[in-house]
Amino acid sequence: MMLKIKNNQRSSKSRYQVWSKSSLILITSIALAFFFFLPGMIDQHMNNVHTTRPEQLDKATKKLHEQLLIADLHADTLLWNRDPSRRGPYGHVDLPRMLEANMGVQVFSTVTKTPRGLNFEQNEETTDNITPLVIAQRWPLRTWSNLTERALYQAQRLQRLATNSQGRFVVLQSKSDLVTFKKRKDIGTKITAGLLAIEGMHALEGISENLDRLHEAGFRMMGLTHFFDNAVGGSAHGVAKGGLTEFGRNMVAQMERLRIIIDLAHASPQLITDVLKIAKRPVVVSHTGVKGTCPRTRNLSDSQLQSIAKNGGLVGISFFEEATCGDDITSIVRAIQYTAGLIGIRHVALGSDFDGAVTTPFDITGLPSLTGALMNYGFSSADIKAIMGGNVIDLLTNALPEKP
């Protein structure tokens, strides 16, 4: 009987050991999938394109596109762990594709927090999708619980791209940087540039001194809100959707002192009104649609467009369906045409939202097709040069500090 009990005990122990080893293998496999495969799968799924076949362009379109100094006001590429120095098999932007597309200046925005169940109507600020992504992508420990550190880490990634690019990519922080970059482009140097931005000033963690830290790290454009209300003011997708807070007023004043461009993308209607009342410098709405062609929550009304134009600001037209009510180039051009007709060509820009967890008609290499579409719609060469980048370059020339 004792022998039987001992045998049962050994059998149970053996089964426990087998179960433990199996469990450990399972847990290890899940952990490895989480850290090494899941982020890439999410990136590939969320940053897609409707077509991967490049359009055949005529000689006139190619010639005009090669003459453009293109600028785009918004891409979220730095959120994802793709190596931006290499051509990726998915996503929208990397250095080889920027050079192929003849990109001049790409604004790279840093995302630090988004709510679970994200939607365009109403979001609370109590949850965060970005934390598990940060952990899964093996970002430094300091970024796991601090939004400012997340922004600073993404800034480091962009600076690293410049350092390792063999002179093909530069980060613009000042007017002198921009002048040098343009001179190199003018003599035919194969080069492109980036500008650092922030998507939502919750990245300050409510600490005003963090504005100086981010400025010192090279940030030259800042969106006040993203998908939820924060200490600065209300989001178009928040709960209260309020206006500018006292803290926000102070931050706007400090941004203008530091010559940081104010971005009103995702801002509530009241926040837009409040900022435009006190802004002394031109603002941008880096990535948006317009209600005149797509009456969605996130898009700008005619009166908002007119107020931004009166401020001397720029409106960046986005490329994805929620902004344009279409999944093709025609819907983008229609929004550009409407905006230009209402407030003038010089207030219109590109605001693709590449790599912003959206599906677009094309990746960055499709920009020549947009040039062709604008030509087909009857825009003049001068108008196309302004829309495709000239207006942004003019704004940066006047807005950036003289020196870093």
Image (spheres, rainbow, N blue to C red):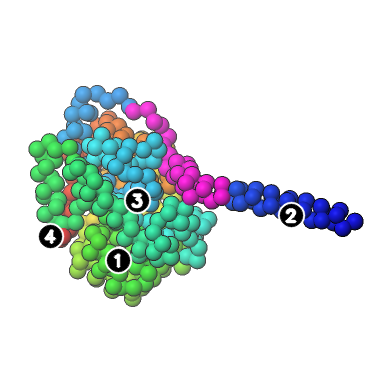
Residue 338 horizontal side relative to residue 226, left or right: left
The residue singled out by tag 3 in the image is 78
The residue singled out by tag 2 in the image is 13
Q: x and y percent of residue 88 in the render? A: 36, 38
Q: Circles 1 and 4: CB distance less than 8 Å?
A: no
User: Mark 4 packing: few (<14 Cα in 10 Å), some, or many (20+)?
Assistant: few
Secondary structure beneath label 2: helix
* Residue 244 sits above or below residue 176 on the image: below
Label 4 – label 2 distance at C-alpha: 71 Å
> Within the magenta stretch, is there residue 47?
yes
Q: Nearer the viewer, mark 4 or mark 2?
A: 2
Q: Nearer the viewer, mark 1 or mark 4?
A: 4
User: Quadrant where the C terminus lies?
Assistant: bottom left
User: Measuring 20% from the left and 26% from the top, which residue is drawn there?
Assistant: 60
The residue singled out by tag 4 in the image is 403
Q: Circles 3 and 4: CB distance less than 8 Å?
A: no
Q: x and y percent of residue 80 in the render? A: 39, 49
Secondary structure beneath label 3: helix
User: Quadrant where the N terminus lies?
Assistant: bottom right
Q: Circles 3 and 1: CB distance less than 8 Å?
A: no
* Residue 288 sits above or below residue 365 on the image: below
Q: Amino acid at mark 2?
A: Lys
> Does residue 197 appear anywhere in the picture?
yes
> Within the magenta stretch, is there residue 296?
no
Q: Main secondary structure of the magenta part?
A: helix
Which of the two labelled residues, at mark 2 and mark 1, occupies the earlier sequence position?
A: 2
Q: Nearer the viewer, mark 2 or mark 1?
A: 2
User: Measuring 18% from the left and 29% from the top, which residue is drawn there?
Assistant: 63
Label 3 – label 1 distance at C-alpha: 28 Å
Q: Amino acid at mark 3?
A: Leu
User: Measuring 16% from the left and 57% from the top, which residue is drawn there?
Assistant: 174
Q: Which mark is residue 275?
A: 1
